[in-house]
Image (cartoon, rainbow, N blue to C red):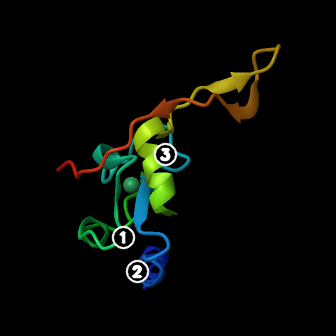
Amino acid sequence: MSNYRAQLERAEQSDKVVPYLLLCRGPMPEPCSVHGKNENLVLPVSHPYWRSTDMRLAPDCKCHVRGVTKREFEELKANGTLSADSPPILNEQGLPTGHKEKLYVPIKTSVSE
Ligand SMILES: [Zn+2]
């Protein structure tokens, strides 16, 4: 069983406490070919989408999911989530500092085909 499937099983067992999952791109410069349309998607742990697709099978996929509590879901709906495309913060010499600007984008709450 993949790490992802194992994570899903664990998530199902604790979905009273952490009822949602958020799909994140991970450290890739472009949206992945499998999940790109559904970046920043938040759905209940039990939603069939999570079982319809595996993470990290395609070569360009470094996506992952993380658990979201009911309270965080409300915050995400109100404020959005940190964008994977947040621009890097440069130092005075114009070199990356390893930090990124905090650019927020709206979450999605329904699956795009
Ligand atoms: Zn992906």
- Density class for disc 2 (Cα within 10 Å; few <14, some 14-19, many ≥20) is some
Marks 1 and 2 close (CB-CB < 8 Å): yes
**Residue 103, position as x, y percentages in the image:** 54, 29
**Residue 10, position as x, y percentages in the image:** 48, 82
Say what secondary structure mark 2 lies in.
helix
- The Cα atoms of the two marked residues, 3 and 2, are separated by 22 Å
Residue denoted by label 2: 12
- Between 56 and 8, the one lying in front of the other is 8
Q: Nearer the viewer, mark 3 or mark 2?
A: 3
Q: Is residue 25 visible?
A: yes
**Residue 60, position as x, y percentages in the image:** 42, 51
Residue denoted by label 3: 75
**Which is more N-terminal, label 3 or label 1?**
1
- The Cα atoms of the two marked residues, 1 and 2, are separated by 6 Å
Q: What residue is shown at x 52% (from left), y 50% (from top)?
A: 26
**Residue 79, position as x, y percentages in the image:** 47, 36
Marks 1 and 3 close (CB-CB < 8 Å): no
